Image (tube, rainbow, N blue to C red):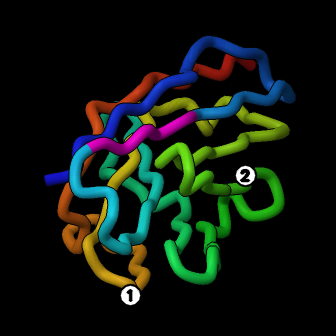
Amino acid sequence: QVQLVESGGGLVQAGDSLRLSCAAAGRTSRNYVTAWFRQAPGKDREFVGFISWNDRSTDYADSVKGRFTISRDNAKNTVYLQMNSLKHEDTAVYYCAARLSWRTSPRADEYDYWGQGTQVTVSS
């Protein structure tokens, strides 16, 4: 079992920055991929980006590429989502998810564990 807890959400203005954290507990000794997804009201859950455990490779959705950066501190079992130049359309509940595999994936249904989510609201 892996427990994930997100933090760092809040209300910001367009153009501001925000950093989300995802702290993992439990069977964190296993290699796993961590991803961020988001869900806006009335919309499907959307892939934001992922980071691998082994080589720290990352990939991002086109909508956030160049603005968002995912990093991880394995010593702290924590993954971060740095969000810059925020836009109103970035408003959503942000979730981190863990996949117990070395294979990365943008598909939500391929992730095994999820956090409870943290709200990010960007005012225009």
Residue 72 location (% of width, % of height): 61, 55
Q: Amino acid at mark 1?
A: Arg
- Identify the residue position indicated by label 2 in the image: 68
Q: Is residue 76 left or right of residue 106?
A: right
- Magenta-colored stretch includes residue 22: yes
Image-quadrant location for residue 121: top right
Callout 1 environment at 10 Å: few (<14), some (14 to 19), or many (20+)? few
Q: Amino acid at mark 2?
A: Phe
- Farthest residue, direction bottom: 103
Image-quadrant location for residue 21: top right
Which residue is nearer to you in this view: 79 or 104? 79
Q: Is residue 41 left or right of residue 84?
A: left
Residue 91 location (% of width, % of height): 55, 30
Image: magenta residue range:
21-25
Badge 1 marks a residue whose secondary structure is: loop
Residue at image x 43%, y 81%?
Answer: 104
Position of residue 74 relative to residue 7, above or below, is: below
Residue 33 location (% of width, % of height): 41, 70
- Magenta-colored stretch includes residue 120: no
Q: Earlier in the sequence, mark 2 or mark 1?
A: 2
Residue at image x 52%, y 66%?
Answer: 50
Residue at image x 42%, y 32%?
Answer: 6
Badge 2 marks a residue whose secondary structure is: strand
The chief SS type of the magenta part is: strand
How many dots with numbers? Answer: 2
Image-quadrant location for residue 20: top right
Residue at image x 26%, y 72%?
Answer: 100
Residue 4 location (% of width, % of height): 31, 41
Q: Is residue 20 left or right of residue 35?
A: right
Callout 2 environment at 10 Å: few (<14), some (14 to 19), or many (20+)? many
For residue 103, the mark is 1
